[in-house]
Amino acid sequence: MRRGLVTGVLGRVIFGAGVLILLFAAYQLWGTDLAEAHSQSVLRQRFEAELHREGHPGAGTTTTAPGSTTSAASSTTTTPDQPAVGAPLAAPDDGSPVGIIRIPKIGVDKVIVQGTSESDLQQGPGHYPDTPLPGEAGNAAIAGHRTTYGAPFYDLNELGPGDLIDVTTVQGSFTYRVTSSQVVDPSDLAVVAATTSPELTLTTCNPRFSATQRLVVHAALTSNPAPTVKPPVQPSGRAASAEASGLAGGSGDWPPALWLGLAFAATGGAAYALARRRRRRTGRWLVYLVGGVASLLVLFFFFAAVSPLLPASF
């Protein structure tokens, strides 16, 4: 009798665990895309509002040094040896929009968010905080998910020398041309190291659905910016180095996941207990329905809190 009871309970636990795993897989494949799409919509509205708030002054140039000019409309500097670059600006706060990246060959049109923590990358491609902003002098680096959360860099492997990457920031629109690509270890910080020429580096996981390596695409600035606004120039003092965690980005926190897990267990348990007390089958299924919807809602947020705790897989 006791053995049969233990076997029955164990079977229910295994079945429940299997269902949770399948639901988590579904969340990773489809639920994360919904969350990323909402975040992208909010970020795009914020970025467009920032452009509108700054205004669009007329173009013009003033001489700053022999052989170089600064655009009065976009605060950019040009030399005969390289395209115009934006003046150093103060980096936006983590989670704020940096600009828009477009890669025509692979259909990318995403708002770049400041930061490469997992919560940042869940919103879209993230700018490495310790590298220059896109369009500035030096090596601007951007990380992005290759799977889940919209998978902005899913087809990054298809880029080859000569392919174009356009980035629009408050300083203007900058065009980069792909020069090379490579696969490195997640701890290899050399790919985002400082450079003397204006470059763009994109990083993502490799192979797909794995975090063992990083696919890195390098591109060089090839065109002068089309002036948009005149932002306040402020040296950022950023050092051209990646985060201490390398190319893996940051991780989440355990407390939210723990509390949401307990909330899910409590919601499901309460629904089951109330349903068992109902004598009529109609009332019982109504409790199951309401409790099931509430449990799934809590489960969605639980999965969102658990996902950043897993090994980085962008």
Image (cartoon, rainbow, N blue to C red):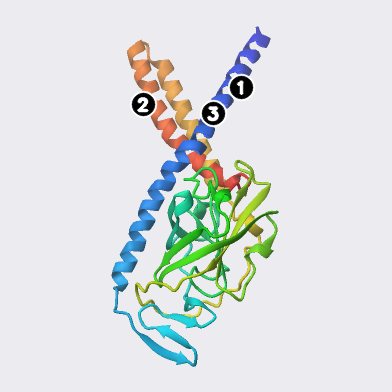
Q: Which residue is mark 2?
A: 290
Question: Which residue occupies the foreground of this view, 83 or 43?
Answer: 83
Indicate left or right for 285 with 305 as reference. left
User: Which is more foreground, mark 1 or mark 3?
Assistant: 3
Q: Quadrant of residue 75?
A: bottom left
**Label 3–label 2 contact, CB within 8 A:** no
- How far from the left and from the top, in percent, is residue 10? 63, 19
Q: Mark 3 — residue?
A: 22
- The amino acid sitting under disc 2 is Val
Question: Viewed as shown, does residue 158 lie left or right of 188?
Answer: left
The x, y position of residue 274, in whole percent, is 41, 21
Does 295 appear above or below 9? below
User: Where does residue 89 sit, x and y in percent of width and height?
Assistant: 47, 76
User: Of all residues shown, which one is farthest toward the front?
Assistant: 162
Quarter of image, res 6: top right
Q: Residue at x 54, y 25 (%)?
A: 19
**Disc 3 and disc 2: Cα gap in Å?**
21 Å
| Mark 1, residue position | 14
Is disc 2 placed on a helix, strand or loop? Answer: helix
